[in-house]
Amino acid sequence: MAPESQNFDVVVIGGGPGGYATALYGAAAGLNIALVERDTVGGTCLQRGCIPAKEFLETAHVKRTIEAGAEFGLSTSNLSIDFSVSQARKNDVVSTLTTGLTGLLKGRKVTVFSGTAQLQAGNQVAILDGADAGTTLSGANVVLAAGSVPRTIPHFEIDGTTIVTSDEFLSLTSLPATAAVIGGGAIGCEFASMLVDMGSTVTVLEGLPNILNGCDTDVVAVAQRAFKKRGMNIRTGVTITGHTPKKSGGTTVHIDGGDDVEVDMVIVSVGRRARTEGLVADGVGVVIDERGFVVADRSMKTAVANVYAVGDIVAGTPQLAHVAFAEAVVTVKTILGEPVQPVDYTRVPWAIYSNPEVAFVGLTEAAAKEKGIPVVVKKDPFAGNGRARIIGETDGVVKIIAEKRPDGSAGQLLGVHMAGPWVTEQLGAGYYAVNWEATAEEAAALIQPHPSLSEVFGETLLALAGRGIHVG
Ligand code: FAD
């Protein structure tokens, strides 16, 4: 049982990527850290987000590979799926990583408390419920890392069977034969892609004119074409008015001015809201915006001295685990008074693990033009790449955007956008090039291994720098 009140250099509220990274990185610097978690360390990312979702997408990938066996001369008849095995495998991956994380926290001597924490006046953190209820921690610094939960929409009450969010979807032991995914963003497209590969009939319903809002339109076009080729129904620009559950199970989703969609399951994937309710006691001056997100500056400082915020709860920042990690580093360095480079949110890597994958960094062509930046653009499809032909995954493109110099040549790289096989693993080179502010020539002078998928990136750079080998 924890003592009634304890002092720490840093008290972290929330044990997701933002919170545990702050704790581990801070402890590595010798700070005495407390971390309070109301559920399980690892947060959304490990328990019900990135890791579980990618495990299911990998199940879909393995199935595709086996199905393609005949092309390689391998007999693959009578393929069957027991999704409960994938669910058990996912649980095993999650539990191994959770055990590893718990061990890391223990090894670095982070004191982990269990319960829901609230920031109170004078940097006191009260634990309101759970095993350590009644304990008050005093932090020379406090880091708010309470993360986010799925947003829901009116008329679609989550029941865990017919209407689900990502939380329930990632715990299924069998998949629906038919599904509607409301929201064609990154998570919605990952789920839809996985379901289509696993044999479900899927309709994506998106209110905006395009799916994958925020991605470059050329990349979206390639991904959308590939999705549709595999049988995914995509309806954009729709307004959903509600649904009528069927007595026999499933429901009928109603679209304003459009055909109904009859499905076994609706997956609501319309973004995530910050989990800030009750996080800060009344009268404590942390600013929470009208959408419920915590306002922090580029050093992750909130409006209250020595109180910081990281991860999904921070207003106006991308909700990505690796962004939370980066913010944790900024926070700890700021606490230590070390020189620190704030996160440049306009140049973080984005990765979507659908089939084909989508990954990008930096400005889209449209965003560059909106900013009035003259650009040079080159694109190279994966269809002509040797490795893509070998693995039999040729849907995809690399598109690179560079600033146009006065003489018309390509200067500094502004954005790298990819759709295709394993692009989430290939984006790293583009990420470095854009963030190191390399020019097209500088980046093109570096060699890609042959035969590799990353040659498409290298070829596109060569073309951008003035003359390509395969690309014009
Ligand atoms: P969280 O991970 O939400 O963790 C917050 C923690 O704080 C939770 O454990 C919660 O229980 C705890 N908590 C909350 N309030 C309190 C309190 N008052 N007291 C004590 N504890 C509290 N990101 C990527 O980068 N790549 C991906 O591929 C990716 N895929 C995703 C797929 C899905 C389906 C989902 C839902 C998300 C995905 N994300 C992905 C986003 C990623 O999971 C989040 O950006 C990341 O988890 C945010 O970390 P966080 O620490 O800010 O918050």
Image (spheres, helix red, strand yellow):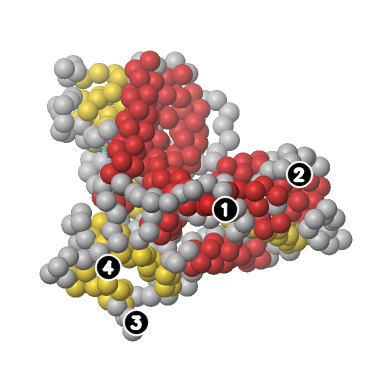
Residue 298: x and y in percent read 50, 42
Q: Residue 443 carries which label?
A: 2
Above/below status of 321 relative to 338? below
Q: What residue type is labelled 1?
A: Glu
Q: Nearer the viewer, residue 6 or 351?
A: 351
Taking the spot 73% from the left edge, 39% from the top edge, the residue there is 449
Quadrant position of ligand 1: top left
Cβ atoms under marks 4 and 3 closer than 8 Å: no
Q: Find numbered disc 4 in the image and state the secondary structure of the residue it sits on.
A: strand
Q: How far apart are marks 2 and 4 (CA)?
A: 48 Å
Residue 23: x %, y % from top left: 39, 26
Q: Please identify, in this view, whether the residue under mark 4 or under mark 1 is nearer the observer.
A: 1
Badge number at residue 415: none
C-beta proximity under 8 Å, tags 3 and 1: no
Q: Name the residue carrying label 3.
A: 258
Quickly name the residue at label 1: 71
Observer able to see residue 25: yes
Which residue is under mark 4? 263
At x 43%, y 70%, the residue is: 234
- Real-space Cα separation, disc 3 to disc 2, in angstroms: 48 Å
- Which amino acid is tagged 4? Val
